[in-house]
Amino acid sequence: MSGVPPDLPRDGELLSAAVKAVRKHRGMTTAEVASAMNMALRTYERFESGATRLNLDHIHRFAVATNSDPYALILSVVIGSPELARRCADNKMATILTVAIQRFDRTIQDRLLDLDARTVIAAVTGMFDTLLDGNETSEQAQAWLQAGAAELLATRPKPGR
């Protein structure tokens, strides 16, 4: 016995719900998304239905086609909240967090090993508390996000086995 309750949704079901939520949020049809992904409609339908294994290439192509957040799609599955993908589609919050983690890792390198969990928890929860207080946007933030997303794309492994 694995200890996992049997009523939890499968990864494919969670991704399917996330993809459908984003597609509907964008007001797009399955045919429009398939075309934007340069993918056969039937292949897209299998992806959207969750009938295939998680495919990072398809997730990233979907995000480009729908101008949404690929990392929010992935996190939707990880945390069991398909609506996270729709909620982050416009502000790209999960991409922002991923860019920040990538830059932090590059800067701190092996010193990351020495960070105390309490310090990390305090910093992260403090950041989220600050987000609850306000919602400001700026051109500088948009430029930061675009540059960081380009860096993530450049370092993402190419699809294939």
Image (cartoon, helix red, strand yellow):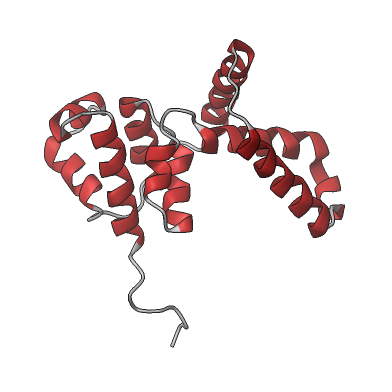
Q: Which picture quadrant has residue 29?
A: top left
Q: Is residue 159 visible?
A: no
Q: Is residue 118 left or right of residue 5?
A: right
Percent x, y of residue 31? 13, 31
Percent x, y of residue 62? 32, 34
Q: Is residue 64 visible?
A: yes
With respect to residue 13, does 23 lie above or below?
above
With respect to residue 15, does 132 lie above or below?
above
Residue furthest top as drawn: 139
Residue in the image at 67% along x and 34% along y: 100
Percent x, y of residue 32? 17, 27
Q: Nearer the viewer, residue 21 or 31?
A: 21
Residue furthest front as drawn: 133
Residue in the image at 40% along x and 79% along y: 5
Q: Nearer the viewer, residue 140 or 109?
A: 140
Q: Is residue 74 left or right of residue 31?
A: right
With respect to residue 5, does 35 lie above or below?
above
Q: Which picture quadrant has residue 131?
A: top right
Q: Is residue 145 left or right of residue 65?
A: right
Q: How many numbered callouts?
A: 0
Q: Nearer the viewer, residue 105 or 86?
A: 86
Percent x, y of residue 20? 25, 43
Q: Is residue 53 left or right of residue 147?
A: left
Residue in the image at 23% along x and 27% along y: 38
Q: Nearer the viewer, residue 157 or 99?
A: 99
Q: Quadrant of the N terminus?
A: bottom left
Residue furthest bottom as drawn: 1
Residue in the image at 54% along x and 19% along y: 146
